[in-house]
Amino acid sequence: MKVLVLGGDGFCGWPTALHLSARGWDVTVVDNLSRRNIDNELEVRSLTPIRTMGERIAAWKSISGRTIDFVNMTVGKEFDRLVALIRDLKPDSVVHFAEQRAAPYSMKSARHKLYTVDNNINATHHLLAAIVESGQDVHLAHLGTMGVYGYGTAGLRIPEGYLKVTVDTDNGPAEQEILFPPNPGSIYHMTKTQDALLFQFYARNDSLRITDLHQGIVWGTQTEETRQDERLINRFDYDGDYGTVLNRFLMQAAVGYPLTVHGTGGQTRAFIHIQDTVRCVELALNNPPRAGERVKILNQMTESHRVRDLATLIADVTGAEIAHVANPRQEADENELVVANDQFRDLGLKPITLKQGLMDEVTDIARRYADRVDPARIACVSSWNARRAEAVAAEAGTQPAPPRPEARPKPRLVRPA
Amino acid sequence: MKVLVLGGDGFCGWPTALHLSARGWDVTVVDNLSRRNIDNELEVRSLTPIRTMGERIAAWKSISGRTIDFVNMTVGKEFDRLVALIRDLKPDSVVHFAEQRAAPYSMKSARHKLYTVDNNINATHHLLAAIVESGQDVHLAHLGTMGVYGYGTAGLRIPEGYLKVTVDTDNGPAEQEILFPPNPGSIYHMTKTQDALLFQFYARNDSLRITDLHQGIVWGTQTEETRQDERLINRFDYDGDYGTVLNRFLMQAAVGYPLTVHGTGGQTRAFIHIQDTVRCVELALNNPPRAGERVKILNQMTESHRVRDLATLIADVTGAEIAHVANPRQEADENELVVANDQFRDLGLKPITLKQGLMDEVTDIARRYADRVDPARIACVSSWNARRAEAVAAEAGTQPAPPRPEARPKPRLVRPA
């Protein structure tokens, strides 16, 4: 079985490439290294010392004996190369991670908004058009986000992509199943709702086989494969743009920086460990939809938590302080979130829970590489609109800034349970 | 009152620019002349002899004494110029026609699909981001399409953008108003559903004031202004990609070509005369939403008809023959369509009906310029997918082609009523 992993150099892409290779798939990674280039732009680096693609692939070969191929290509710009690659390689599946994936980065400035829309929509569309053009029967699995649903759905259990509704017609009430009405919270999330329309169209018009994985916020760093050798280590983003909330808390605790909770911290979000991400992708590839079937949508998450509860949990374990800061995001202060994830459970997923995996991460990663943290990059500086920017600036001007750790912070002692 | 008309050289844009100028608006047209360039690509030309923008604007000045400014710019590529233009001009409104607007063209090949998505999404997004960046309070009126609703809605009266639905929640059934679930029939229509997500996001996040006009199929050619001088004449597309169904029938009748009905002709579509288009845009500009209000969506159509009924109507009046041909489009053979258009009626729109305006068009335009028709460009050659392409090709191979008019066809006599 052959698979193309688009965006296979990124936080989810690289461990997926390794996981599939370890399970016997012939893996070709396609990536333009944009994530590394954005690190350059933002003047940040992964907490973990990630290696070049060349070194990663060589290390994997020496450890597993297996080859991962790598093509440096911009999906969304180089259509003819993409078609030729699909025609030559004849992959059974393509996993599509090749999008700009940070909400704060997508809201950073007009230029970042334009880049995110242009990059993500053209990447997805080039891929769909290329599969049609190639004439190959390829299953496409796309990494989407729980964020397409929005978080304003009180009392409603979020289904897997499609929602049963009743509408009034001239013939009385009629039941219909519709794509869940999207309510994206950032330009990034919005591009995923635009992707969804592309998927619906190509599944209907061209009978493409498409799976859209609506993923929760990923936490953790390592998988069975990435921990086999330090040269295979996965990236860990802690900066205000790319760092995800739970990994940021873990890092902040490790370096003695207060846990930065936006607003009340009443936002409820869905989570999944990176190890479960790669398992879910494998399960999705092994259970594709049939040609002519509608787009298969799975909620790729394993548990939901309120942000302030996460902060309290980590503060209790590590002794970290909590700092409530102005929220740069335009979003509700408080929301509920109940999510269906029956399909992956039915396929046999045994989730790694937060309680089970939490301490490993603190010990293994956040503390081990704490001296690589640049504290100046921790704050979230991308505001959603002028009003939020003013609130953040006002707080910075009128309130004392949260206490800064030293330049080379030392881990704090774990408070006994 | 100042207005920017993006795409003001096109079929709807040019008469809109004239109409608003005639009503006292200071009009600046922005256009990159892409529609004329596509004529070059397709080796077709407008049935009517349209003039250059320079000649059009000079003619309007000499007739009305009013100035229309023109900026040759690609919206969606030249962000900084667009921001500077909005900052300098400080328009009250922007009318956004600057998109590739033909469904068959959007399905012509992979390259045309890619162009349509890239062009339309980036044009709309650049405009939204530029308004935010400019800091100006500008009302944006966008030309959308009835096609975003899809045509599979038996028994449901299509509302104006938003649909009341009932969903089951843990607390019992709950009523919600959602954006009408889109069901676009081509890549072109799909881009308009992606635009809609952009509008929803920017209205919510940045309190932009946005009106989305879901327009029916436009017919007719001339408006009060364009008929004042032949140098102001509007374009009339009859070719298989850009010609719309009713104008194509009128042209076919005028040159003695059979009326080409796709499949059974059971497709029901919404229609509007070009004169009503420009009136509706004016009404929309004069009735903008308030900042913070949701996107205002109006159905810009005045009547619905089944395609085969239109063909019969025109055949009865003109004596034209009807030819049923294989449908290159992936669509239902038959559909109902009942549409709400209360908002424009409440604003005082008095529609031009088909019966009332039909004969003027046949006489004034289609016959007058009949010797400009290239019969080789009448057939629809863009198929939606491989299956439809095969059906079209099979028909061409096994059935006699429809009778061809002479190279310089003469109008047929109108059959007495």
Image (cartoon, coloured by chain):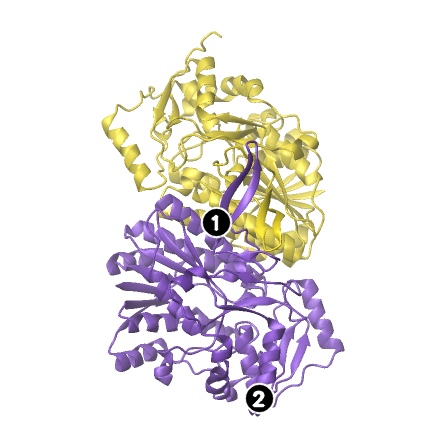
Chain colours: A purple, B yellow
Q: Secondary structure at mark 2?
A: loop
Q: Which is more toward the observer, A294 or A309?
A: A309
Specify the farthest residue to the right. Answer: A398
- Residue A194 horizontal/vertical position (percent): 49, 53
Specify the farthest residue to the top. Answer: B416
Q: Which residue is label 1 attached to?
A: B119
Can residue B7 be seen in the rendering of this structure?
no
Pointer 2 with pointer 1, Cβ within 8 A: no
Residue B67 falls in which quadrant of the image?
A: top right
Can residue B172 be seen in the rendering of this structure?
yes
Residue A344 falls in which quadrant of the image?
A: bottom left
Q: Residues within 10 Å of mark 1 (few under 14, many from 20)?
A: many
Q: Secondary structure at mark 1?
A: helix
- Chain letter, disc 2 residue: A
Give the amino acid at mark 1: Asn
- Chain letter, disc 1 residue: B
Q: Quadrant of the N terminus of chain B?
A: top right
Give the amino acid at mark 2: Ala
In the rendered structure, the answer to whether residue B142 lies left or right of residue B363 reads right
Q: Which residue is label 2 attached to?
A: A417
